[in-house]
Image (cartoon, grey):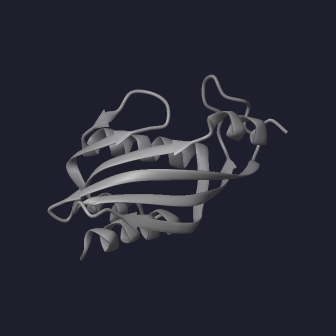
Amino acid sequence: MTDLQIVQAYYDAFNARNWNEMLVLVDENIKHEPNQGTPRIGKKLFTDFMQHMDESYSETLKDIVLFSSATEGRIAAEFVVHGTYKKAEEGLPPAHGQSYILPAAAFLEVQNGKITRVTTYYNLELWIELVSK
């Protein structure tokens, strides 16, 4: 698979909620840089994060557009998150099944057929506004 195909398969697995297939595509030493908070290094921490997210949110990514750079292994993704807020998180509004639609983006690196970095960006203030209505 090409780097672009690997990233497409990663997002396809995300949308199918096939976490095992998604995790097969990431490197053991993946660097996950979330929109807020401390980066996570390693598949174990990334897996823990994904399990936590699955408990708190149900999300599908739509309108995914992938961009590859001239430098091999670097992919940017733009998408729209269609989600449901299922379980409240500390410091965030209460959850009661609110739905939201939020533009977002990610930057990924692929090396030796595995995703080695995922950096995600979205507007947290807009998300808070959407789930506070």
Give the x, y percent position of residue 117. Answer: 30, 48
> In the displayed structure, would residue 66 be above or below residue 127?
below
Residue lying at the far front in this picture: please name it: 70
The residue nearer to you, when weighing 23 against 133, is 133
Locate the C terminus by quadrant. top right
The residue nearer to you, when weighing 77 against 23, is 77
- The answer to whether 125 appears left or right of 49 in the picture is right
Residue lying at the far left in this picture: please name it: 112
Give the x, y percent position of residue 50. Answer: 43, 47
Locate the N terminus by quadrant. bottom left
- Quadrant hosting residue 113: bottom left
Give the x, y percent position of residue 36. Answer: 49, 31
- At 59% from the left edge and 62% from the top edge, which residue is drawn? 60
- Quadrant hosting residue 93: top right
- Quadrant hosting residue 115: bottom left
Give the x, y percent position of residue 9. Answer: 37, 71
The residue nearer to you, when weighing 75 against 15, is 75
- At 77% from the left edge and 36% from the top edge, which residue is drawn? 129
Q: How many marks?
A: 0
Residue lying at the far bottom in this picture: please name it: 1
> In the displayed structure, would residue 36 be above or below residue 131?
above
> In the displayed structure, would residue 90 be above or below residue 75?
above
- At 27% from the left edge and 64% from the top edge, which residue is drawn? 70
Residue lying at the far right in this picture: please name it: 133
